[in-house]
Image (tube, rainbow, N blue to C red):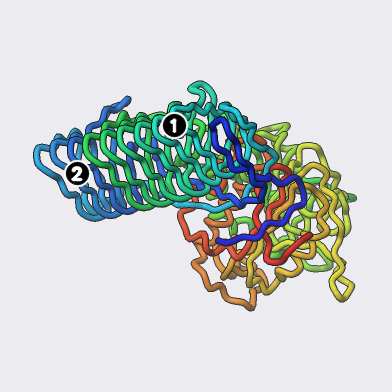
Amino acid sequence: YKRQTQSTGTVCFHLPMYIAKQQTYTLFLILSFLFLIESANLKDYCISAGKTLILNSNFTYNSQDGVSSFSAGENVFVGSYSRVGNIFAGEIIYIGKQVKIDGKLEEYSTHLPWIAPVYTLIKGTKSPTGNSTLSPGCYDSVTVAPLNTLYLQPGRYEFNSLTLESKSVLTSSVSSSTIVIVRGDLYILDFASIYGSSNTSFFVIGGSMDVGKTVNIEGAFIVNNSVLIGTEFNLKGNLFAVNNISIDSNASVICSSSFGNDSFILSNITIKSEVVNVPHNPPNSSVVYLPTTIYYPSELSRKYPLVILLQGAQCPRSSYSIFCGLLAQYGFVVAASDYYRRVDGDLNFWTSARVINSIEDAFRQNPPIPSIDVDNIIALGHSLGGAAVLQAVGDNCFVPSICEDYHRRASLKGIIGFGANLRNYSVTPDQFINIYPGQRFVAYLQGAIDGVAFPSRAMGTFDVTHCTSRSIAMYEGMNHYGITNTVHPPGANPDPNKETGDHMEGINLVAASAAANIYSYLLKTDSAFTYLLAGYRGDTSRFASLDVQYTCCLLYTSPRPRD
């Protein structure tokens, strides 16, 4: 996970900070990361450890909404004279004497939340002000001196590390969201306090969390490593750790059921699908009707951005049903059409950029469901469809057969291409076509062993994509058909390179990546970053490299240096 940052915009420089009378500043660039949580319903849990959970003697809890749950991926230890709710353990539960159990015990349980870290690099523009109130932004090491109070205004913060010395206080708003990302460790020394709300105060800790004795904290805490807590600990909120949690004697917890209202969680969503016919009017031809499958969340509680998938050459839309369903779970309406026509004498599936406008027009005039946000459209293309969406976002019909006199509209907010590039096909060596998306985003998702659309061509097209919001991601072990239901869709030309990773896991990973790009661009708020890659259960080490360049947003790195 080591990255090298490259800068195309404003970079956040970080200053170490000590909240006291004297200030010492050292200027340097720091790398940061953000951890996101999978779509398990974490609000049902009070304290959850990815490995071992230890609750020592005299542990008590109260719940704001019924019986709360405590869980561990491995073993749970509950000390004597404690009170707990439900306990779910991946292995064994150990109970001391005179323990009051309000709920049920379940060993070798499958009813466990999945807590998975995801690494990103962040860039921003803020520097610390030096007084007892901070504005949202990027900081290095912040230490709150004894008996001092640091107030965090609502917004999103990054700290290289955060230390609360003895009897110090960190406080944030109870009415507006405050997201605190600590790239390293969080230290809370004896008698220190964190005040906020589990509804609005969210802490993501990249390292460990070390808590002294007689500490009071309020908020929702997600810890990438382990948590060690001293005696007489009081928590009002929720605590999750990827590894171990150990809480010493005489702890008291008030569990919150509202964690996730505006935070890191995408709730599990059931997807429905139905087929509609979309009228399509090719240039100099009569109207044809495109059979189109739409995938959408069953709970239509709000408007969902519209993702239009343009199929690869000779690939029927049914080849993408798994991918479309997974993507819809992130809160999108996904539409995939079959455009079956004759191109250069070959009758087969040949999509075009004009399909984007045909679907928009049909859904504006006669929406198949009421919750489609046709003012926020993202076009996602595979292979030939990727070349089509690249022409669409650049408003450049370089290849007329897969453009069909398309004209870009304001409703198109960005595009994602999988196995996509745009070049002059009659010239050797490759001559890539300049793309000018304006304020839209462009994301390239690419199998690292793609033997049809070579990774070097995706990189070459990325280099001539002229916008402030562009990204490229490479996936190890993935070939050209990383998002289709099978590694060789019926009728399509096979990739000579065989995939080396799990195919279903790869589809899940690319769907999460696509959702990450869309959310980070469309939401344009601090909390947008909390949704990135939420819901992905698998091994993020399959990322060979990522390079995302957003103005004052997130930065992944590419496999080669840039200026």
Q: What mark, if any, has residue 146 been given in the picture?
A: 1
Residue 268 shows up from this direction: yes
Q: Quadrant of the C terminus?
A: bottom right
> In percent of the image, x 54 and y 31: which residue is there?
20
Amino acid type of the residue tagged 2 in the rendering: Val
Is label 1 in contact with label 2 (beta carbons under 8 Å)? no
Q: Earlier in the sequence, mark 1 or mark 2?
A: 2
Quarter of image, res 105: top left
Q: Nearer the viewer, residue 5 or 189?
A: 189
Measure the C-alpha gap from mark 1 to mark 2. Answer: 33 Å
> In percent of the image, x 9 and y 41: which residue is there?
97
Amino acid type of the residue tagged 1 in the rendering: Pro
> In percent of the image, x 76 and y 41: which residue is there?
412
Q: Measured along the vertical axis of the image, is residue 227 above or below residue 316?
A: above
Query: Residue 276 location, x and y as percent?
Result: 63, 43
Q: What mark, if any, has residue 78 been given in the picture?
A: 2
The extreme left residue here reads: 97
Q: Nearer the viewer, mark 1 or mark 2?
A: 1
